[in-house]
Amino acid sequence: MDFKQPLLLPQKFPLSTQPSPLLKLARLHAQPEIFYSIQGEGKSTGIPSIFVRTALCNLHCIWCDTDYTWNWIGTRFAHVNDANPDYKKFSKKDWIAECSVAEVAKSVAAFPCKNIILTGGEPMLQQPGLLALMAFLRTESSDYRFEVETNGTLSPSPEFDAAIDQYNVSPKLENSANPRKLREKPTALRFFARSPKANFKFVIAEKIDLEEVLSLIQTYHIAPEKVWLMPEGTTAKTLAQRRLWLVEICKIHGFRYSDRLHVQIWGAKKGV
């Protein structure tokens, strides 16, 4: 999407009364990362959706494929791409776009779709701004539906919870290289386990990861039908190797299987 092109704002969006919170969005190809595609993972796989990618994250997964939202110059976080001599950490100034709620709403409204996915980074670090965005868009159409993709470490405010239609919770495992005290927050996980709006997606790299998943499910009383297992990987070859045994695990435990449809279609390309 080219943000340099003028976009028509629906009449219900008053430019003169923009809400005050600023949203920190990821910047990709020198533009705020808002794009129209299909959901490639989890419960909503295949559904046409508009993605709004926020910057900033409170975790630092070693295999993260959106590390331009958190792996800043001067930090000591490790990443699998560190072995690549061409890989460099990212400048906050160059990779964060501060946008008004009205600007983001204007960009979202330009697409012929009402399913919005708030992703990141970790979107729930910016609940007030996203809450304002949801309210602003619903003044244009009550048909807007909002999903949020979260690592499950932050509980929503009552107002945010009321506005969200679906939580796509992806608790991080030991394979993410985040310390357990950072990646596992009991209060938040208990909230999501009880919420009828929440489903859980676990990223599986090796068969041993299943032990940790089963422990979390037991500890927080997560119903099997709310669980999706997804292979870790950014290439079709890696996904093909891991899905063979991961599907069998899902069959044994009554979990859902999630592929990474966007990787199958576009590879590791961003913003699609």
Image (tube, rainbow, N blue to C red):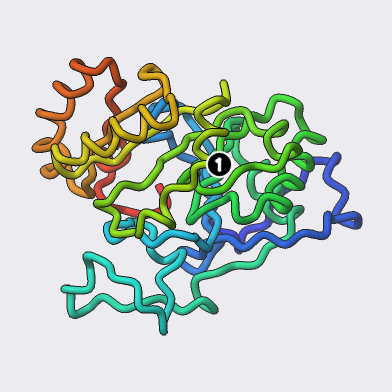
Residue plotted at (48% across, 30% down): 48
Residue 156 falls in image quadrant: top right
Side of 238 where 76 appears, left or right: right
Q: How many marks?
A: 1
Side of 111 where 60 appears, left or right: left
Crowding near the residue tagged with mark 1, few <14, some 14–19, many ≥20 C-alpha atoms within 10 Å:
few
- Residue 124 place in picture, x, y as percent: 59, 49
- Observer-nearest of 150 and 218: 218
Side of 54 where 127 appears, left or right: right
- Residue 263 place in picture, x, y as percent: 27, 43
* Amino acid type for the residue under numbered disc 1: Thr
Looking at the rendered structure, the secondary structure element under dot 1 is helix
Residue plotted at (70% across, 42% down): 157
**With respect to residue 126, does 247 lie above or below?**
above
Residue plotted at (82% across, 59% down): 20
Extreme residue in the bottom direction? 74
Residue 251 falls in image quadrant: top left
Q: Which residue is mark 1?
A: 187
